Image: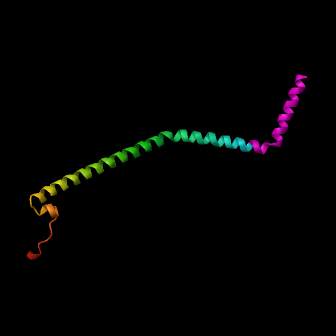
Amino acid sequence: MKNWLGLFAALVVLGLIIEHWQTILVVLGIIFGVVLAVAMIAAAAPKLRGATERALETRRNAAEMERARRSGLRARALTQHDWYLGGSDRGVYGEFPPIDLAKL
């Protein structure tokens, strides 16, 4: 009796496979695609991590350069302010005074 039941179950499974082979192939294709995508992402993760670290380092360098630029600008503005308070024309015009038209 157990043999007949096993044979009947095998025939039912075989019938389902024959009837729904297209659906089974689609599901197996989707599973294969997902596994392949996960494997590719896992393989690319170190490269992505390196690129992210380089991008962060570039951003930090750019921020540091901007801070240095602003610091220099601030120092130059304070110097020109001191010149202005001292009555010097450099306090108004900075390092580039206007041309004296009387001398032309």
Q: How is the image coloured?
A: rainbow
In the rendered image, the vertical position of residue 86 relative to residue 59, given as above or below: below
Q: Residue at x 71, y 41 (%)?
A: 28
- Which of 91/73 is in front? 91
Magenta stretch, overall SS: helix
- Location of the C terminus by quadrant is bottom left
The extreme top residue here reads 1
Whole-percent x, y for residue 49 in the image:
46, 41
- Which of 2/91 is in front? 91
Q: Is residue 10 magenta?
A: yes
Whole-percent x, y for residue 23 in the image:
76, 44
Using the rendered view, name the quadrant where residue 98 is placed: bottom left
Using the rendered view, name the quadrant where residue 36 is placed: top right
In the rendered image, the vertical position of residue 23 relative to residue 95, given as above or below: above
Q: Is residue 2 magenta?
A: yes
The region drawn magenta spans 1-24
In the rendered image, the vertical position of residue 64 relative to residue 8, given as above or below: below
- Which of 70/42 is in front? 70
- Location of the N terminus by quadrant is top right
Whole-percent x, y for residue 70 in the image:
26, 52
Left or right position of 72 against 21? left
Left or right position of 55 against 97? right
The mark total stands at 0
Left or right position of 54 against 2? left
Whole-percent x, y for residue 71 in the image:
24, 50
The extreme front residue here reads 85
Q: Residue at x 12, y 75 (%)?
A: 101
Q: Residue at x 72, y 45 (%)?
A: 26
